Image: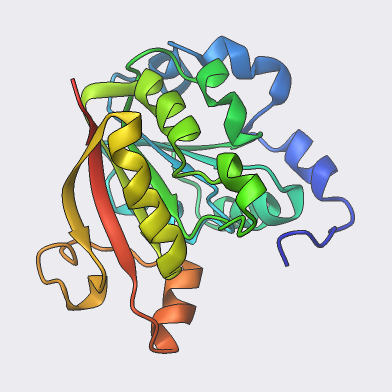
Amino acid sequence: MRLRNVTGSREVIAASPYVIQEALQPDCAGAWNKVFGNSQPVFIEIGMGKGKFIHTMAREHSDINFVGIEKYSSVLLRAVQKMEQEELANLKFLRMEAEDITRVFGSGEVDRIYLNFSDPWPKDRHAKRRLPSREFLQRYRVILKADGRLEFKTDNRELFDFALAELAPAGWCAEAVTYDLHHDEKLMEGNVMTEYEEKFSGMGNPICKYVIYPRA
């Protein structure tokens, strides 16, 4: 589904007021308070899929600004359609490659980063493309505030083990780790499920999660 082309999706996204267009993205770095017109904290989701998670979060937390990032137009289209049905002033979208994240957010501008059910890129030669890799952790360190946090959820145990192994080399620390989120009472507080989380947990797959922060 992620790679399926949806006719007209690029045109809809290019005309959407909810999407920060590519030409304007560099202007946002260090200026997201101007984009939203307030000084609220900025939370981002990288690889947001159809947008269920971030749209729900934005609805439930109007005192926080949310930015959803997705590189596939056909998937981002679904999130745009959700916004057309229920517009939220504290939610914006970006269609972009995650590798360019430091081009769009300024140093220490982001309060929280969410990675939900990211592409596992199972081949070893593609390890650098995995969103919880040390290469991406270095990018996140730049844009995350000193007291910020990154949350990662997945049902892929191999990817999760890889992500945990990347923390020390990248200079990050774990605040919380679970291999079975839905049976962890503390970490389940306020949990918002993604489409994939509903699907995989419904199949009986345990959901792994960590909350991490960069070492000073």
Establish if 189 lies above or below 139: below
Question: Residue at point 69% right, 26% down?
Answer: 21
Viewport quadrant of the N terminus:
bottom right
List x then y, in percent, for residue 32.
43, 19
Question: Residue at point 19% right, 67% down?
Answer: 188
Q: Is residue 100 left or right of residue 141?
A: right
List x then y, in percent, for residue 58.
37, 47
Q: Is residue 157 left or right of residue 48?
A: left
Establish if 40 lies above or below 81: above
Viewer-side residue, 86 vs 168? 168
Viewer-side residue, 86 vs 10? 10
Viewer-side residue, 52 vs 181? 181
Viewport quadrant of the C terminus:
top left
Establish if 151 lies above or below 94: below
What colouring does the structure picture have? rainbow
Viewer-side residue, 107 vs 129? 129
Q: Is residue 116 left or right of residue 210?
A: right
